[in-house]
Image (cartoon, coloured by chain):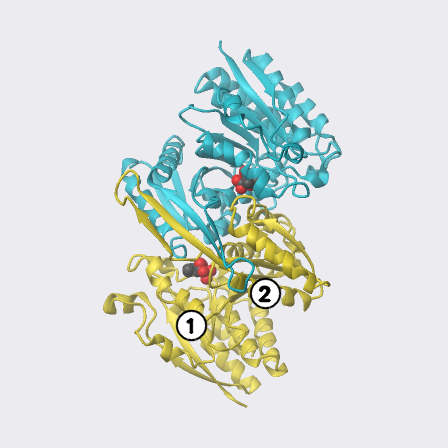
Chain colours: A yellow, B cyan
């Protein structure tokens, strides 16, 4: 069995508190399922590093990371130290783009034991994926200012959509939908207001749909789609969206299932040319850092997705993934719970409880 | 007392069914409060007109409308007849931009008798405004395609933010927050991902805040803000947002309070140089058109906002607005109800019930 080389980047704030618990559970799973994981910790890609070096990462970060199989990533950002657009564009967003992790896969699932903010929903009712384009679209640093500092000041911000970029994420989403029992794909658009890029997105969906005759698909404008996440989340199966719309929907979805603290995500390079990044959806939460109360479940669940990805279809790895998710479900249902879930357990308590169940 | 000249544009689909009820209630309120409203119906700005004339409106639409005090507007769009970006950019979005209706004001309020999709909320818990920039930003038809039809196809979509455009909507929002008991303003941003326009938006908020020392303000990235609408909607008072973010939040907000069918909106030109447009948040819903089951309350509530605007501070008009909102509350609580609210009443029944209470 081959060794999987994993780079560990904790980042800022609670990234440093949830990462040890993620690693604890990964190690427990590796032992039980006889999987060979080799972790290498990187001390950079955080705001303190930036304050010292004037950049988020060493100049040879690409060379240092490119041969890893995966990057296990906590959370980056500490706005009082470094503006977010600098810290994020200097780390996470660089990985997504330069390692061509064009799929951001985010499960939205109502788990047992998690109080749902929506009335009358029970575990199982909500269970879908957001498939987010992760390299182009609205996330762009192309543009600029004119007449700066005057009354005429004008700021241009470019969104960039390419056929390659749009088609490959749609293909991934159609294939995922095809693999699921409901075979239902929803495309997020806003072609009634955003008059150039979004009609193009719609066109590409329509061009691809005939290749997947067994998938039934629909599209909604992002405004009403956000509303439907709240009003009828059980209708969704796979939702495909541009970078920005996917970002919004993949926070909104987990909020509708109770909390973004437990939501995982995978930034995937499906061709495996470069490492993929596995990170919780939540951020670095400087306001609660240092108390060891952050919920580590998003970090742990992201690790489960990492194992599944590393296995690439191997049943033993899928079993490891499923065992971790089941352990998470048990801890969510019976505790211990961190304060955000109404308990008084520490980050460590929760991580140890999940690890023990393995 | 002066005559208020109001242009009536029903538009497409259920716009044609809810408009008569809106007018019925406006006329009842006008009689009771002795307000002089003069309605002029325009038969254009709908997709059938487009199919006949190749454009949504006559070429002299601006001249025909510019001297009205307000436009009472149903809903436009019928995608099977005309693509949405053509029908909307040819009507509603033209009004917003060419009549410089730069404020889109949308109340989000949990009303009595409306089943709330969020658990454990009661009327009064949710009560805030979304103030949406309505003329620039992400809603743009600037951009284009290159390498069209090839594998290299690239689509550029420009967002345009001007100091004038950003500052005036922020000023409106700060003033609105200042006028309310909580004096709390939340700014929607995404400066960690959208690297040029959104940091600019943040900068302008920070530049303006010192002029409103009694308003406490915060900012959230749009992803987590959408999540908070679901998780803690009672925290909000006034939320200011760009065109796109405001669009999303002002559908999501009403969804969190039960239904977008009852949500009203005002597209305001505060200087009153040109007419303002009052329209429900919901769309033209071709799928339910023709059955007389559409909920007219969004249309009616928008009419109440129109009266308030026409009064420009006059207590009699404010009283008319409040009386309509109270009548709406009574009908929501005691019926009759349209099918979307769990009843079996018709659009007409509901309109008549509200009118009668006046
Ligand atoms: C119909 C559409 C163009 C419009 C918008 O996006 O502004 C609508 O959703 C709204 O919110 O008024
Ligand atoms: C931190 C931020 C740049 C990032 C994003 O917007 O992609 C985050 O919100 C996410 O969803 O991973």
Q: Secondary structure at mark 1?
A: helix
User: Would residue A223 appear left or right of B176 to someone viewing this image?
Assistant: right
- When the figure is inspected, residue A65 is found, relative to residue A189, above or below; the finding is below
Image mark 1: chain: A
Image mark 2: chain: A
- When the figure is inspected, residue A234 is found, relative to residue B101, above or below; the finding is below
Q: Is residue B160 visible?
A: yes
Q: Position of residue B293 (x, y in %)?
A: 72, 34
Q: Position of residue A10 (x, y in %)?
A: 39, 71
Using the rendered view, name the quadrant where residue B137 is placed: top left
User: Would residue B101 appear left or right of A43 to someone viewing this image?
Assistant: right
Residue for badge 2: A333
Q: Is mark 1 within 8 Å of ligand 2?
A: no
2 or 1: tag closer to the N-terminus: 1
Q: Secondary structure at mark 2?
A: helix
| Residue appearing at x 55%, y 90% in the figure | A1
| Residue appearing at x 57%, y 85% in the figure | A33
Q: On the rendering, which quadrant does ligand 1 occupy?
A: top right
| Residue appearing at x 41%, y 76% in the figure | A8
């Amino acid at each position: 069995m081959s060794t999987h080389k994993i780079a560990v980047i904790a980042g800022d704030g609670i990234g440093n508190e949830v990462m040890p618990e993620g690693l604890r559970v990964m190690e427990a799973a590796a032992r039980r399922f006889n999987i060979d994981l080799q972790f290498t910790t990187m001390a950079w890609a955080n705001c303190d590093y930036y304050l010292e070096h004037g950049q988020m990462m060493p100049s040879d970060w690409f060379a240092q990371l490119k041969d890893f199989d995966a990057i296990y990533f906590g959370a980056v950002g500490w706005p009082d130290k470094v503006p977010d657009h600098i810290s994020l564009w200097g780390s996470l967003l660089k990985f997504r783009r330069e390692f061509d992790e064009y799929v951001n896969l985010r499960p939205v699932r109502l788990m047992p034991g998690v109080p749902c903010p929506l009335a009358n929903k029970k575990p199982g009712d909500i269970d879908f994926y957001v498939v987010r384009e992760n390299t182009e679209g609205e996330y762009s640093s192309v543009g600029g200012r004119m007449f700066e500092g005057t009354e005429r000041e004008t700021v241009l911000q470019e969104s960039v959509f390419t056929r390659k970029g749009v088609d490959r994420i749609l293909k991934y989403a159609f294939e995922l939908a095809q693999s699921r029992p409901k075979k239902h794909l929803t495309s997020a658009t806003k072609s009634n207001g955003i008059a150039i890029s979004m009609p193009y997105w719609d066109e590409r969906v329509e061009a691809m749909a005939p290749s997947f005759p067994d998938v039934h698909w629909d599209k909604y404008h992002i405004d009403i789609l956000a509303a439907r996440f709240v009003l009828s989340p059980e209708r969704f199966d796979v939702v495909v969206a541009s970078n920005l719309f996917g970002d919004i929907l993949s926070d909104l979805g987990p909020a509708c299932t109770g909390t973004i603290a437990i939501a995982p995500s995978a930034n995937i390079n499906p061709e495996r040319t470069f490492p993929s990044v596995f990170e919780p959806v939540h951020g670095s939460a400087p306001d609660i850092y240092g108390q060891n109360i952050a919920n580590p479940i998003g970090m742990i669940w992201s690790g489960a997705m990492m194992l599944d990805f590393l296995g690439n279809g191997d049943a033993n790895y899928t079993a490891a993934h499923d065992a971790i998710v089941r352990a998470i479900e048990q801890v969510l249902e019976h505790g211990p719970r961190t304060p955000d879930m109404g308990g008084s357990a520490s980050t460590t308590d929760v991580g140890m409880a999940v690890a023990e169940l393995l």
